Amino acid sequence: MSETRSYPRRVKTEAGEIEFRLMSRADEAAVLAFAQKLPTHDLLFLPRNISEPKVLSAWLNEIDRGDIVSLLALRDGVVVGCGTLVRDRHSWSPHVGEIRMVVSPDVRGQGAGRALSQETFAIALSAGLEKLSVQMTVDQRSAIALFEGLGFRAEALLRDHVRDAAGATHDIVVLGHNVAQVRAQMEAYGLPGAVEPQV
């Protein structure tokens, strides 16, 4: 799914040099350590609690099957972020991919999240998907702004859609990006590379 991207690749950010590489089973312990340090609210970005070892193991099984691609962001060899592209070829929406992303508070606001979102978006574009979606809690304004900067637009608000460990419910906003439509419009204007992220 990432045939036009090569990894590892490095990007300089205000947080320092960030290395991006594809996640594999060898990363299980490092990703678990990363996930278990995340604030509980950040885990609501994801449909599953990746701080649980059995959930992480199932995630790695999906990577092995090729159902998802996960990109790790590392600083000095430590995982500080993860971007994932999920698609279900056996559903009614094989042309749609979902981006899931979470970044350590240690590197937020320093360009690492933006770089990770651009890299994950590039992987999604190289997969030939026609539409992308991403979801997050409505109070995650910085994350929403990141994806709006990539051309995503709000499509739905799901009220009381997730419940945190304390039992409180939170609204989720779903953002969508119609890659095929935007690409067709840009090609009509003679700008075929316009939906490619600048990384």
Image: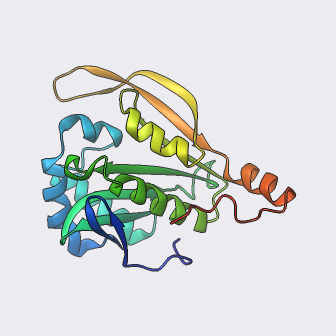
Q: Is residue 12 above or below residue 107?
A: below
Q: Position of residue 121 (x, y in %)?
A: 52, 58
Q: Residue at x 47, y 55 (%)?
A: 86
Q: Which residue: 28% across, 48% down?
A: 108
The answer to which of 178 and 103 lies nearer the viewer is 103
Rendered image coloring scheme: rainbow
Q: Is residue 104 left or right of residue 195?
A: left
Residue 165: % across, % down? 17, 29
Determine whether, in the image, residue 69 is placed left or right of residue 57: right
- The percent coordinates of residue 104 (x first, y second) are 23, 50
x then y, percent, for residue 41:
24, 34
Q: Nearer the viewer, residue 178 or 47?
A: 178
In terms of depth relative to the viewer, which is nearer, 52 or 72? 72
Q: Residue at (46%, 63%) from the top-left corner?
A: 119
Location of residue 106 with respect to 89 vertically, above or below: above
Residue lying at the far front of the rendered structure: 14
Of residues 87 and 35, the one nearer the viewer is 35
Report how many numbered discs are placed on residues in the image: 0
Is the residue 66 above or below the residue 182 in the image?
Answer: below
Residue shown at 21% from the left, 75% from the top: 26
In the image, residue 150 sits, relative to residue 68, either above or below, namely: above
**Horizontal side of residue 25 vs 2, given as left or right:** left
